[in-house]
Image (tube, helix red, strand yellow):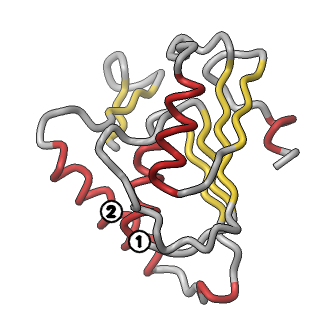
C-alpha cells in the first residue's frame, strides 16, 4: 500500500490498494512484505494464539496471507470486506477445525449487498470448512469497538 497527500503536499492522506493491473505480482509482494515484518519479530508460533483481523480491502490480503503462510490461528475476523475472489477450496486444510471465523458488516455500508451474507458464508465455508459467525450491525463501513470487545 502506498500513501500520498490527496491535495498537494500536505493535508488529508489517501492510500492506493491493489488493482487489476499486475495483480499477481502485487499479491506476491504483499506476502513477502508480511513475511519480512514477521521475521523481524522473535515469535515462537507454537506458544502464541494468533488472531487475524482484516478490515475492508485488508480482508483479502489477510485471507491470502493466512492461506499462504499456513500458520495455525485461533480466530479470524472479516470486517466490512470479503474473502478474495479467486477459488480457495481447501486453502485452509491445515486448520484443526477448532478455529473461529466471524464476518461483520454494517447494514448501511455502501458496499453491502443483501446477498453477501449467504455468498460470504458459502465462500468462507468452502475455503476453510468452518461455518462463520455472521453479524450485520447498524452502521456503515466502520469498525464498532463495542462489537470488537465481544470477540
Give the percent coordinates (x, y) of residue 64: 39, 55
Q: Give the left or right position of residue 39, taking residue 72 as reference.
A: left
Query: Which of the 4 image quadrants contains residue 43?
Result: bottom right
* Badge nearest the viewer, 2 or 1: 1
Q: Secondary structure at mark 1?
A: helix
Q: Are marks 2 and 1 in contact (CB under 8 Å)?
A: yes
- Label 1 neighbour load within 10 Å: few <14, some 14-19, many 20+: few
The correct choice, above or below, for 57 with respect to 112 in the image is below
Numbered label tally: 2
Give the percent coordinates (x, y) of residue 121: 57, 37
The correct choice, above or below, for 86 with respect to 129 in the image is above
Name the residue at 53% across, 80% down.
Answer: 41
Query: Which of the 4 image quadrants contains residue 130?
Result: bottom right
Q: Secondary structure at mark 2?
A: helix
- Of 44 and 121, nearer the camera is 121
Name the residue at 64% across, 67% down.
Answer: 97
* Residue placed under numbered mark 2 in the picture: 31
Decide which of tag 2 and tag 1 comes sooner along the chain.
2
- Label 2 neighbour load within 10 Å: few <14, some 14-19, many 20+: some
Name the residue at 67% across, 64% down.
Answer: 99
On the question of residue 2 being in view, the answer is yes
Name the residue at 41% across, 27% down.
Answer: 14
Residue 8 badge: none
Q: Give the left or right position of residue 37, taking residue 142 as reference.
A: left
Give the percent coordinates (x, y) of residue 116: 53, 23
* Residue placed under numbered mark 1 in the picture: 69
Outermost left residue: 22
Q: Give the left or right position of residue 143, taking residue 9 as reference.
A: right
- Of 4 and 22, nearer the camera is 22
- Of 127 and 59, nearer the camera is 127
Amino acid at each position: 500500500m502506498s500513501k500520498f497527500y490527496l491535495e498537494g503536499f500536505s493535508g488529508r492522506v489517501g492510500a492506493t490498494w491493489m488493482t487489476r493491473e499486475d495483480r499477481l505480482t502485487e499479491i506476491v509482494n504483499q506476502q513477502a512484505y508480511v513475511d519480512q515484518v514477521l521475521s523481524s519479530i522473535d515469535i515462537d508460533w507454537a506458544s502464541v494464539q494468533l488472531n487475524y483481523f482484516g478490515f475492508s480491502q485488508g480482508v483479502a490480503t489477510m485471507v491470502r496471507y493466512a492461506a499462504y503462510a499456513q500458520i495455525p490461528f485461533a480466530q479470524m475476523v472479516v470486517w466490512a470486506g470479503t474473502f478474495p475472489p479467486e477459488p480457495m477450496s481447501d486453502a485452509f486444510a491445515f486448520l484443526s477445525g477448532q478455529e473461529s471465523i466471524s464476518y461483520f458488516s454494517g447494514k448501511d455500508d455502501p458496499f453491502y449487498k443483501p446477498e453477501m451474507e449467504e455468498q460470504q458464508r458459502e465462500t468462507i465455508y468452502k475455503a476453510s470448512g468452518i461455518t462463520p459467525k455472521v453479524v450485520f450491525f447498524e452502521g456503515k463501513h466502520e469498525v464498532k469497538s463495542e462489537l470488537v470487545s465481544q470477540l
